[in-house]
Amino acid sequence: MSKSINELQDEVIEEFALFDDWMEKYEYIIDLGKDLPLIEEAKKTEDRLIHGCQSRVWVEAEVLDDRMCFTADSEAIITKGIISLLIRVLSNQTPENIVKSELYFIGEIGLQEHLSPTRANGLVGMINRLKSEALKQLAK
Amino acid sequence: MLYLCTMVPFDVLRVRQDFPILQETVHGKPLIYFDNGASSQKPQQVIDRINHYYAKEHSNVHRGVHHLSAKATEVYEAARKTVADFVGATHEEIVFTKGTTDAINTIAFSFGETLKPGDEILITGMEHHSNIVPWQMLCERKRCNLKVLPVLENGTLDLSEIDRFLTEKTKLFSFVHVSNTLGTVNPAKELISKAHAMGAKVLLDAAQSIQHMPINVQELDCDFLAFSGHKVFAPTGIGVLYGKKDLMESLPPYQGGGDMIEYVTFEKTTYNSMPLKFEAGTPNISGVIALGEALNYLNSLDLQGAFQHEEALGKYLRSHMREIPKVRFIGEAPETCSTLSFLVDDLHPFDLGTLLDQQGVAVRTGHHCTQPLMQQFNIPGTVRASLAFYNTHEEIDRFITALNRSIQLLS
Ligand SMILES: Cc1ncc(COP(=O)(O)O)c(C=O)c1O
């Protein structure tokens, strides 16, 4: 049995609890960004682009055995790190669970400032995109 | 200037006490506010003035017979006089707008009405979107042509091309005095006289110069000048359009409504004279009064000393930035103000901005509303540090440390 979205969120929260200061936290996010499995250059098309981000972010969604599989890329490494956390929590989940999910981990790990819809990094845009890809699957 | 008698030599630490927000902390660290190009902070005197207005003086202007209306009108018009004195104009030449954008749109619409198909508007390659899009819209409406004076690699205008771009067809040359992205100070006076020689009118976008240098419209001889209150220590939502009186009287109004009329019948309306002709509807009274107060505040300072301090800060910033490996300046004009755009190696501006923010440093990252300029330099954006006279050398030192730490984390 693979882990549920909330189990994965709790895991992330636990990891972040180990950090004492902002530097350690961002160092970790930057490392995640470097490890993010990239999408192919050819797939960086307009329809995969998330608007409203200061750095361009592309997301690719696929379905494998009824579960969603996401890959992404961005020009900014911190943005990549943050989307990598989102993907870790939401990948390999059913579209239904993704749509229903409530992503409390973002606030818990102190990234809520990235959540404001007016922030230039578009974390809200990323979440909306992942959920809308799941919604599209449900509608099929 | 009016307040010279009470003037004490510029002392940055004392002046900082006048700006409450500068005492704030961000992420537990003292705020270093280097985003003055986007908007400047407000002195207590301006904040108090808004309160006082609403507590003691508020009513509508130019209308009532009663005491408060007369009072509000009096302080409103006194602010107009303060603004006029500040830029060397007469009070009839000062129109209050929402900001620079609104001022430019006013001219694009009103002056634009006088244009014919085939007429040309000249701008430059370093304009803010607010000095591009209104002209594009006008050119579409009136079948005019928009010409763009190129920018060189070092961030200066290609003046060798000016005679090719400025012709008898040019009806208006609208350009930025100081580039918000590059920090370049353009040779305004020279460009204005060249334009006049060709019979063109000139609009000077002073959004980024009014807070950094003395501006005198008579000396510059520009036909129109635009700036925003919020970049010159006043509130948002208020700005200024200066226009030469005779020229403004000859132009059609922009918006119709109350205040801008002389006499209205259903058949025909005659318009008020300058400046009210361009101020339709109830204006931003508290904004106007607070703008007047911000300029009073500046007049009470040793402004020359303030500008010298700022110039020294700009040089200090540039020289220390040059010591950081792989830093590249976007804009290396010989004449710059204390605004510096840069990139570090191939790091994304967003990453640098995010890590600087964590250390209490507020900078702007992105395209700075100058996308065509970004396209020319083939970059996604820049990190921009833009200073004001209330910044200090010590803040620059802390900024450099924070930047070095950010680079280290990202590399
Ligand atoms: C050079 C320049 N022009 C125009 C503007 C537009 O000013 P506002 O948004 O206050 O109307 C700005 C503001 O960023 C600017 O820097």
Image: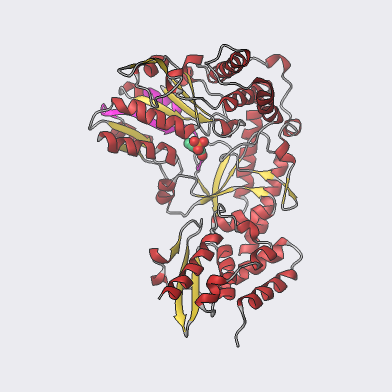
Q: Is residue B127 visible?
A: no
Front residue of this view, candidates B391 and A7: A7
Is B192 colored magenta in this rendering?
yes
Q: Is residue A124 visible?
A: yes
Front residue of this view, candidates A115 and B308: A115
Question: In which quadrant will I find the C terminus of chain B?
Answer: bottom right
- Residue B2 locus on image (x, y percent): 64, 14
Task: Please indicate whether residue A82 sits to the left or right of residue A133 in the image.
Answer: right
Check the image and report above or below for A65 versus B121.
below
Check the image and report above or below for B188 versus A137.
above
- Residue B74 locus on image (x, y percent): 59, 14
Q: Residue furthest left?
A: B117
Q: Residue furthest bottom?
A: A1
Q: Residue furthest top?
A: B65
- Residue B11 locus on image (x, y percent): 74, 29
**Res. B140 image quadrant:** top left
Front residue of this view, candidates B181 and A67: A67
Q: Which residues are magenta?
A: B167-194
